Image (cartoon, rainbow, N blue to C red):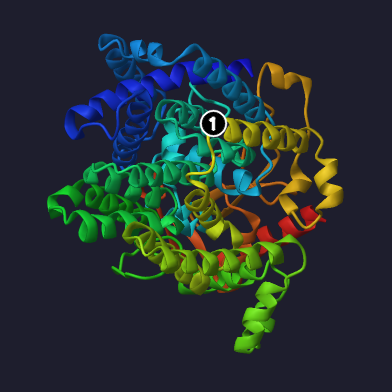
Amino acid sequence: MILILFSAIFIIPVLIGAGKIMDLFWGSLFPGIAAKALAGILGISIVWTLLSFFIPLNIYVEIGTLSLGFLFFFRNKLYLELYHFSGKDIFLMITISFIIILAGTFSPYILDHFGYYVPTIQWLTEYGLIKGISNLDFTLGQMSVWHIFQAGFSNFSDPFLRINTILLIIYTIYIMERKAWIHLCFLPVLLLFSQSPSPDLPVIALSLIILNEIIAGNRNTTLLFAFSIFIFAIKPTMIWLPLLTFLRTVFIFKSDFKKLLFGIFILLLFFAKNIWTFGYPVFPVALGDLGVSWKPNPEILKTSSQYAVQKTYDMQYSYEEIQRFSTFDYIRNWFFLDGIKSIINILFMVSLITFSAFAWIKKRKLVTLICISLLIKSILVLAFSAQYRFFIDVFFVIFFIFFYDYFDKRKSVTVFSTLSILFIFILSFPNFIQEHLPSFRPGNFIAGFEKKQFYRPSTYEYHQYNTYEVGNLKFNVSKNYPFNFDTPLPAISTSFIFDDGKAGIFPQLSDKNDIRKGFIWKKMISKEKIEAEDVINTIKNTDK
């Protein structure tokens, strides 16, 4: 807890200072230090994304950013804004922050932390954005903007990768400043995402902030649209939010097109990043082919697409079985999966239908636009991969709209207190959820509470790997473990090695003397096929 507290004390003033710089160019989204901290996140993320095309996000980038942020924080005496809070609000804020930091000290348990988040951050800090990296390890083609933001602070400010915990503290400051008490009801759920730099937490928290500003009548179209695009850039399944802000701009405010230019710039930067790392504008969709030489092999894209279809049905059916489904089977089997996923899917459709009826009855333009945006997003998710993690934000939005006027401070604090106790209990004693909700697979990886958490957050270490070589690529593979969260770079997950071998290809360096020149895929010649087969056989024998 102590080390996370130090990270928060270190990073939040830097974000506020960076936000002051953003204010000089774009103005403030709303009054207060929370707006400056959020603007700092946006500004730093944009700058670091641009820098990462050319240089790694190493300690020199971090020191430069910290120095500039601290300079503006102290020179402009931004710390004085903390005195605007009442004594009661300060006490509540400290109490909530204590709970947030406590939750953030638990061990990471989301599997993407080990297979995607940490490896991405490793690449960004050591090399920056690498052209065609999806050819090495397909998942790395995502390179979320949130991981770019985390990477820049991971050298020494936040080495335990708890930036989500820090964001929740900023979210708390926002709630206190704007008296938006209903948001306290969402905080306990978000505690479950605070141990990893999961993009799910920032997109939910930030989207609820933007939605709150929209409902409150905020007319700063430029920043509302820019933040909406930024949230979309973190996780494209949040497409409903930029749709909403765009529709609101056009049909309610009828604003000038110029007000959208900042957001359009962020969107173009997002496309450029994806084309650079993946070969197409939006990962993992193979649409918008520009014919770049480093785009993934069609067979790998096909495998990824098939896997996404299987994930829609929680891997409970093979791809061949799903292909034989009738239209009725597609719908019925999705609703009646084994375990908790079935309940979530049914609730999702019931919520959408209920909210659509609510919008129809209310006939308020803003509510109608929110409903249209959510429906478009839901149709796209259902069409590509109807996994619950892609539409979980819809529950938050609908709850927010339905109960916006109901939850005052007292009710919200009560809900926050009750749910926080429940979720801290689950994190501390995971056997409870493992026994009573076995279909919630992430629960099987929760480790429970350890005394060392009072000083430093719990982390995992493995450091077991083997080194192989195929063609001009020398690479590392985690030994007897599917993920490469602490394997030296370049590292490849075993599943992608098997996929490449099956497709008759293998990743190669564009320039064998410079890893920063990126990766391409190459049809294997006889010698390389033998090398790849040896690697695959060794991995299989080791895993036994």
In the image: residue 472, left or right of residue 445:
left
**Against 466, is 57 above or below?**
above
Q: In which quarter of the image is residue 177?
A: top left
Mark 1 residue type = Lys
Quadrant location of the N terminus in the rendered image: top right
As helix, strand or loop, the secondary structure at mark 1 comes to: helix
Quadrant location of the C terminus in the rendered image: bottom right
Q: Position of residue 446 (x, y in %)?
A: 75, 40
Asked whether residue 236 appears in the rendered view, the answer is: yes
Q: Where is residue 331 in the image (x, y as percent from the top left)?
A: 63, 80
- What is the count of numbered marks? 1
Judging depth in this view, the residue of 440 and 162 nearest the camera is 440
Q: Where is residue 210 in the image (x, y as percent from the top left)?
A: 37, 44
Asked whether residue 531 appears in the rendered view, the answer is: no
Q: Quadrant of residue 423?
A: top right
Which residue is at a point 61% across and 72% down the rendered structure image?
Answer: 502
**Against 134, is 43 above or below?**
above
Judging depth in this view, the residue of 315 and 177 nearest the camera is 177
Residue denoted by label 1: 409
In the image: residue 173, left or right of residue 98:
left
Q: Position of residue 114 (x, y in %)?
A: 63, 44
Which residue is at a point 74% across and 54% down the rendered structure image?
Answer: 440
